[in-house]
Amino acid sequence: MRQYEKTGILSIKDLQVPSKKQLEKGVAILECVQDIPCNPCVESCPVHAISMKDINAPPVNDFEKCIGCTKCVGICPGLAIFVVKVKGNKAWVTLPYEFVPAPKVGEIVTALDRAGANRGKALVKKVIKQGKTMVITIEIDSDVAMDIRNIKV
Amino acid sequence: MGVYTRYDRGHSMRIRSHPIIDFKKRKEIPFYFQKKKVVGEEGDTIASALHAAGVRRLSKSLKYESPRGFFCGIGKCSSCLMRVNGIPNVRTCIAPLQEGIIVEMQDKLASLPDAEFDRKPKKTLHVEVLVVGAGPAGLCAALESAKQGASVLLVDENQIVGGQLVKQTHKFFGSKQERAGTRGIDIAKELENEIKKYQEGGKLQLMTDATVIGYYESDKNYRFGVVQRCEYQSRLFDVRCQAAVLACGAMENMLLFPGNDLPGVYGAGAVQTLMNVYGVKPGDRVLMVGAGNVGLIVSYQLLQAGISVDRVVEAAPIIGGYNVHAAKLQRCGVPIQTSHSIKEVCGEKKVEGAIIVQLDEDWKPIKNSEEYIKCDTICLAVGLTPSTRLLSQIGAQLAFIPEAGGFVALHDKTMQTSVKGIYVAGDASGIEEASTAMIEGKIAGLAAVIQLGCSKDKKLLDKYREELSQLRAGPFGEKPRIAKQKIAKMKEKSHASI
């Protein structure tokens, strides 16, 4: 049994992790590790970086091809895709958000990790709407770039 | 003053701000409950209006007169039966609210009214295909049959079509042809619009607020009785058809524990209906029982409606639903406790809390592991049971298939049951989900008209079957895959023995 099957919380070991250089340009982290019948991320990718063997296989991101465009973030029905970009001691995480109230650009919000724990503050840099899903980019410290996956407004 | 009552500052139970659904204030609809004036909103059912007004107790048990609230919220159980304008046993969870109606709690057994079929003669309808249930399977079956040129009657118990799609605010999985990435509520609208097109073309008739009450003897074709409720005066239809697709759906399972009948213990789907269709909060703090996809998705949707979820308990050692759904909840700070279950509900007349307990490897409660949780709502997401009563009455051969969720009608690859011309689709043919239900509906609708000679498109049938097997190919498709294999095998065997 894998730990996430018990808790629902993925760890970095369960994920495909990009190199430092790839993180610097910004890439999509696909937090979708199970065989479920779903493929909108593959169809949404403009550079064909995301692929899967068949509709049930987990998606794989070719970090070399990925341009971090964030198109897949608002498409994923499982809200399981995050774009992470790191530069120096700052990082930007783009995440899907479906709650009210909507955060505003420039607002300081609480940064939450995969277990919903408060991990400090985040600055909202960008808010776009993809259908009813908001795609939000926050600025955080680079050391928590691979931990922060949610915000509390 | 005096006649106008708002129970428990009831309007605070209305959801006004929501990230996915636009819950605008609708026209106020006054009505009477226990002789007091209550105000609901346009689009409400009687039960949702009462709930919004703070009334959770709708009936009482016959023997001990224990208070009862509604459980299923979709007209499948009996805990919301009330007397409306003198008519007893009205399922208030699906009965549309109308201005000035008189709603009363029933005393023990209801008395038989004279009003029900008063001066309304029955009407005979002739169609080629009758489709029972306008959920994802039924809608697709009706559309498929109509597309091929057959005349179709589609009957549903609710005031709106879409079945359980109308409360699925999340985006669907799957591929493009199954409308992946589209929310269930939007799929319901798309299908409804398609239905309208065929209604205008005259090929398809839609009858809502109507129940198929039984199957009757007929020498030539199939004959069903349908009762349509119009302003609490029912009308009887005698429907003659050459084929029927039964897409009657399923109902939520109950779990045994002390206090499980208290108002505030709901099926997770009932809560989803209440908040996502009618915009009414079930309560303020919820304990979710069951971490399958339904439990996980509804928990998240509760958070989206501004309702707090204390935690999710799951008796199995692992989470049954998709990890992506569990992860969404966890990152909002809602813990999921596997190997935990509910022991009992606390509260006198309503839910005030619950005691949960940890389970060992044999699923037995571990001593002294009890924990008290303060909550006003318990949601049960512990599986579904196919609705097969009509199939059983027709004489379709049923079998108990645990992987299908209980008794199901045996059916072949074209969804035809052991009774020629009677098809089944969706959850009624084995518990699964909406994407596969839609394809099963298409298969049944198409196979029915092929048999009637309206179509010869067997290639399309094969294409649908291929889509279906692709969706079931992964590990999460294992259960339905096994269920369908067993069903097919038993069907073959029974066919050989006849």
Image (spheres, coloured by chain):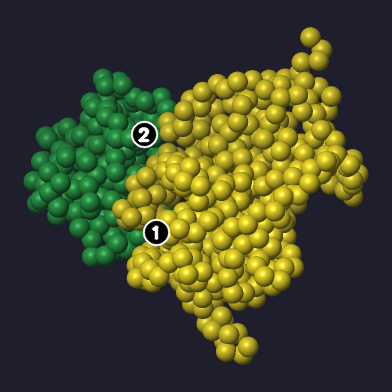
Chain colours: A green, B yellow
Nearer mark to the viewer, of 2 and 1: 2
Relative image position of residue B92 (x, y in whole percent):
72, 39
Q: Quadrant of residue B358?
A: bottom right
Along the line of sight, the residue nearer the viewer: B367 or A70: A70
Which dot marks residue B178?
none
Name the chain under label 1: A
Residue at which label 1 appears: A3
Along the line of sight, the residue nearer the viewer: B218 or B443: B218
Relative image position of residue B18 (x, y in whole percent):
47, 29
Within 10 Å of the Cα at label 2, are there few (<14), some (14-19), or many (20+) other Cα atoms?
some
N-term-proximal mark, 2 vs 1: 1
Task: Name the image quarter holding the N terminus of chain A.
Answer: bottom left
In this rendering, is residue B415 above or below A28?
below
Left or right of B280, for residue A150: left
Along the line of sight, the residue nearer the viewer: B185 or A37: B185
Evaluate whether residue A10 shows in this view: no
In this rendering, is residue A59 above or below A95?
below
Relative image position of residue B392 (x, y in whole percent):
69, 68
Going 54% across and 72% down the picture, which residue do you hit?
Answer: B416
Which dot marks residue A132?
2
